[in-house]
Amino acid sequence: MLRYLKRNPSLAVGIFLLAILVVFIAVGMLLTDPEDARPLSVPALRRPSWAFPFGTDRQGRDLFAAMVVGTPLTLRIGFIAGILGVTIGTILAFVAGFYRGAVDTIIRGIADIGLTVPGLLILIIIAVSVRGGLTVNQMALVVASLAWLNPTRTIRSQVLTLRERGYVEVARLSGMNGPEIIFFEMIPNLLPYLGATLVNAVSAAILASIGLEVLGLGPLEAPTLGMTLYWVNFNAAIINGWWWWWTAPIAIVLLVFLGLFFMTVGLDEIANPRLRRSV
Amino acid sequence: MRLLYIARRFAVFLLIVWLAASLNFFLPRLSGQDPVRTKLLAEAQLGGYVQAGIEDMVKEYNQKFGLDKPLWRQYLTYVGDTTRLDFNYSISNYPRTVRDLIAEALPWTIGLLGLTTLFSFAIGTFLGALLAWPGAPRWMRYVMPPLWALHAIPFFLLGLILMYLFAFQLRLLPIFGGYSPGAAPAFNISFVLDVIAHATLPALSIVLVATGGWALGMRGMMVTTMGEDYVTFAEAKGLKVSTIFLRYCVRNAILPQTTALALALGQILSGAVLVEVIFGYPGIGALLFQAIRENDHFLIQGIVFTVIVALGFTTFILDVLYPWLDPRISYQRS
Amino acid sequence: MSNAPSRRTVLASAASLAAISPFGLATAQPAAVPREKTMILVWSGSREGRWVDYELWNPYSIGSNHQNGPNIIYEPLAFYSAFADKTYMWLAESYQFTPDFRQLTIKTRAGITWSDGVPFSAEDVAYTLNTVRDLGPKVKWGVDVHQAMQEAKATDANTVVIDFLVPSPRFFFFLTYKYDIGIYIVPKHIFDGQDWTTFKHFDLAKGWPISTGPWKVTEASLQQKVFDRRPEWWAAKAGLAPLPVVERTIWLPSVGEQALAQALITNQVDAGFGMQPATFRTLFNGNPKITTHTGQQPPYGYVDWWPISLYVNNDVKPFDDKDVRWALSYYIDRGQIIDVGYLGASQTSALPMPDYLPLRPYFDAVKDLLEKYNTLEFNPKKGDALLSGKGWKKDSEGFWAKDGARIRVDIIGFGAAGPAMGPLLTEMLKRRGIESAFSMPPDFDDRFQKGQFVGSIYGHGGSINEPYGMLRLYQGQSVAVPGAHLVNFSHWKNAEFDKVADEMFAVDPADKARMIPLFRRAMEIWIPELPDIQLVQNFHRIPWNTTYWKNWPTADNAYVNGASWHLTYPIVLWNLKQA
Amino acid sequence: MSGAALEIQGLRVSFDHPLGLLRAVDDVSFTLRPHERFGLVGESGSGKSTMALAIMRMIRPPGHIDGGNILLGDTNLATLSGDAIRRARLAGIALVPQGSMNALNPVMRVGAQVADAMRDHGVSVSARAIDALMARVGLPAGTAQKYPHELSGGMKQRVCIAIAICLRPTVIIADEPTSALDVVVQRQVMRTLADVQQDLNAAILLIGHDMGLMAQFVNRLGVMYAGRLVEIAPIAEIVRKPRHPYTEMLIASLPSMDHKDALRGIPGLAPLLRDLPSGCAFHPRCPKARDRCTTERPEPRALGDGVLAACHFA
């Protein structure tokens, strides 16, 4: 495995960045008391110091604890929505791509129209309609409601190309029925591509959830990355010069997105070997 | 053959518009909130003094906005009005009509979004093409990694950082709004410069992020195209390097980029909503956010409908242009 | 140029990028006035940086809001400044109730003319009041006038006689401008025959809006509203008030707190809207000339008449039990809310009334009760005792529960106060074993009015200079005021209390001898019951730039409250002096 | 040697590979006389296509030309600088691509693809001239306006030929021009190739592996094995009496109309350039192999009648 990573630097960088994140969270869990992520735990608006490595926010949260507790929450939203999105997407893609016919046109139509509509707008409308405040899990479901559109489209186009390949014809001739072909022939070949699509879906889901949270439509108590940025904006932290309040979440968001981004590039190369030659 | 192709694409466009209109009608009503009541109560509360007789006032307003009719009647009038581009009054901004509000906000978004998207698409594509080209200058190698890194950041986060650096610390650029308060819009130089100054940070936060994306996409496509047989034969034909680069490689590699552009428009607008909200930019994004916050049914319907139609129309134009770009396409469809 | 919107289709304007200037293009650019004679302010009542209501100068029409400009156009019968406890008789020279308060005679001042030269008379006052009564729910204040007033007659050019359906000792005070409450007197010769709900009363060519006041609208567009001084103002001639030194005031729509801060620091703007405490330190070291009601010291503003409390829906079990409500009150540390939520720049509020001068005697009358039942006491042990006394026990995770159900207070909030205190309140309750969550639903007002909440952070639009306003907020039902739509957000019902409030309704507020004992009796019922949990005063923290203008209303020069959006703002405008 | 259309002297081309240097073309020399048709055959991987690209100086990294001269008339292409080599391509020496390749730009009309080649060599060309060129390669009028996907395989190949001859080069390299074409079209394309050679009086280097096709078209034939030229001889001579064992087996594997015995293939596989057998690369598969073959690499020796062979026992 290591030898392989040498030949695919993007994937290596991606995994490395996410590894840093995991280490940060693990070490963080040991060093701080997760309770400090709740308001009124520590004196407010302290600059970063030994006592508070990331400083503290206006509501008395220790930002280091908030990041250690909040980051997994945001990642969880991303992963739940991403995985849900890709699973539904893959099923629909195979149903459409493999069986074609009316089902295909309907699914393709919905996906295409869905993609032209700016996702965030629909998410905002849904988030606003939910009566009570959103919990982290509800947030994941809201984001997942649109997360399947892109995977459906991209995987369907892959299924169409695979469908014409020789070994699928051979499998069909040798009497394997639809699902068997899909599971034993097509999916194994699509795995790297599915991997890349999953990482992409997770990244898009995290982006959407942070977008919603920054607009104040997320779980107000949870110290997720998006909600921290909402409070940054609400308290005009920028103009008041509390720079540490937004540098920590933005640095972590950067780490998350860069990590996922390089992993996507790396996985793309596996799925599309021609790209590998000229990194 | 061509007309049939265009007709079919237009039918798809109309279908999208109709679907958008219907989806658009039901979504705001999904939330089960009564916008008129919210508006009146918010206004009464502004003065801290709760009006007696709120219930009766709500009935009056509902009547005026036609919200008291049964849902299906509302839908019929809605579809009728939409065909005439009349989206009724904006509840939260009464007495201004939704159409006027959109007409005021649309140019800002088109200006910001249109220019930044085209700009980043052009630069990104060119950079990506150059990067894949072995003959490209050395320094290209060093431009790409930062652009790639920037591509991973969401628009509005970069916006926050730029706002902190340029507007707050260095006080070079205005921090907020579409133009400085008090400046009356006119076609003189000072106002235009003022608008440009205000648009710089939002535009930068979009361009810096999007360019990396287009560059990466194009690089991938160029690598694939350069491996094609017709490029090798072009070289064998002794064509100039520039001819091979532009008319053989870029000309073919740009085809999937344009499809990607059509698909990306929707997502770019999503990002722009946040940029507009954070920078207080008076575009469609900020207007929609305010409409949703105040649950203004008609304004939400008007904006989402306009956005979908605009996007649908752009996709339609790209669809019609595509065969002109790639002759193979029209051939297959007929 | 007619201001009717041209029939431009959306797509056409989308195509013409040059149409950056919407059809609201300002007409002729008004004559230039030097910067030092111009007062520029920013008000956040606009929509995302645009005056969408720039055509609306009829404060009674749908969608109009007096805070966005009409408040300095229409002069009232009288102004009242709560800070100075002073009434400025204005269009009305004097007024007289009959002993049974069933009739009111108002003498209007002679020699006042509208800006189009037509003389102002009692006819305008009678016409205004009768029309408001007839329109009822269609216009602002309609229902209030409809419930109380039977008929207003102008017996001669300067006398109006008003007959009431029920004794209404507070009616003239209701007409008076104070904070956001008061009746706008409109010119009969313009408004007569118009549909008040849609009539805009805006046409610069015709000099509309017509006004008796010192300010004339010279420009109104999406970007700004410009008012120029009318030298021929009757009040200056009559010596009632000095002619404003300000020759032009420009009102700008807000695009957010950060932009306002920058504009103030760079002297582009002279006055702003209410800002968060944290931002003031940045303002002061950005521009030392910036000051507030309390100079450059916290709380950076004055006490608004709208004290904020944690409403608890008394219809929802177990919050119908006063011991549970008191327990909640004991669990809340008001000190920490002020330190963390407002960075120390706020004050506690023991009763749902502001501590204004005219209300002091009433506070003194119940001082002993407040000591016995301290509504601001932070004492978790007392709270624990109360809850365990009522059979609640802490479960395995430390939350109070009784036969399987935990106490849960989900709090909703809005605007600035909600987010500032919401997360802190939920945290304090959670630490004491009460489950709680905070959210800011967009339809906050709707749900709060309909009682669809458990906990809610909201203010009290009650009393300014006498307690009846506050008592009315907690009346379960009222006999005195027929068909009155009662407020009662906390859904607290007490027949005895209702009777006392009804009794006070018929008493002349000036008659302290009867008012104080009545108030005492009401508080003896209210305080032990504690329908909602008292928190803090609401502050208007307004930044003023003294580079060009001074003599802003401050703590030691409190001639009136300084809110530009209140109906008493003309007083500030004629008090400003050049720096 | 004056008078040769194209002379290759000791051409060496190798590729860098993580596992070491691969010599695709190892010290190959031969001469192409004007107006001559010279064939070059060999199993795939024997280096014949690499040779074509090397002659056109189109070897891309990780490959590189290590040495040898490429004399086109009196100019040595091996030493030409960047733009000079570009101008030489098509004007001096032209390439006809493989039949199976889609060698034409899919989004440009075929006529334009001829015009741009000439324009980049400073030759202005009218539409009428292009139509004439198309006619010369047997393409119907109006073909110039068509797009590649609107033409058949044979027609596309003829367009390539038209492009190859548009600047009247002295040498045309045809790298398996008829691969993936059916026999009928194959014949038409080869006929066109022959006709144009008449007009231009140019020399043709025909690369391929179809001995039958070679036998009907070329004057002389060269056989490549593992990057080396193992035999050169006039076509009649080589068919009658192949000298090198590998040529012998190649000829034997040809089906012939007159004798019907079983076909004999060549045992074993083409050697991997990574680990070439020592001495003569063919010795593991060569029936006449002796000890000497495994140690000493045979150099090509003239055997009279214009025949050269690189074998100790030819």
Image (cartoon, coloured by chain):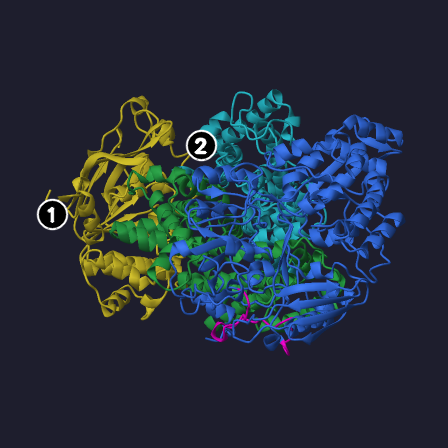
Q: Is residue D130 left or right of residue C539?
A: left
Asked if disc 1 and disc 2 are in contact, CB closer than 8 Å, the reply is no
User: Which of D82 and C381 lies nearest the eye of the viewer?
Assistant: C381
Q: Which residue is mark 1?
A: D3
Q: Which mark is residue B37?
A: none
Q: Colour of chain C?
A: blue
Residue found at x 85% / y 40%: C318
Q: Which residues are magenta?
A: C192-213
Q: Is residue D163 left or right of residue B96?
A: left
The answer to whether residue A67 is visible is yes
* Quadrant of the image occupied by residue B258: bottom left
Q: Chain of mark 1?
A: D
Q: Colour of chain D?
A: yellow
Of helix, strand and loop, which one carries label 2? helix
Q: Chain of mark 2?
A: A
Query: In the image, which lettered chain appears cyan?
Result: A
Q: Residues within 10 Å of mark 1 (few under 14, many from 20)?
A: few
Query: In the image, which lettered chain appears green?
Result: B
Task: Residue B197: say if magenta.
Answer: no
Instruction: State whether residue A194 is above or below residue A62.
Output: below
* Quadrant of the image occupied by residue C102: bottom right
Of helix, strand and loop, which one carries label 1? loop
Instruction: State whether residue C464 is above or below residue A56.
Output: below
Cα distance between the residues tagged 1 and 2: 54 Å
Give, as a three-letter code, the residue at label 2: Pro
Q: Which residue is mark 2?
A: A9
User: Which of A2 and D61 lies nearest the eye of the viewer?
Assistant: A2
Q: Residues within 10 Å of mark 2 (few under 14, many from 20)?
A: some
Give, as a three-letter code, the residue at label 1: Gly
Instruction: State whether residue A254 is above or below residue C163.
Output: above
Task: Residue C201: say if magenta.
Answer: yes
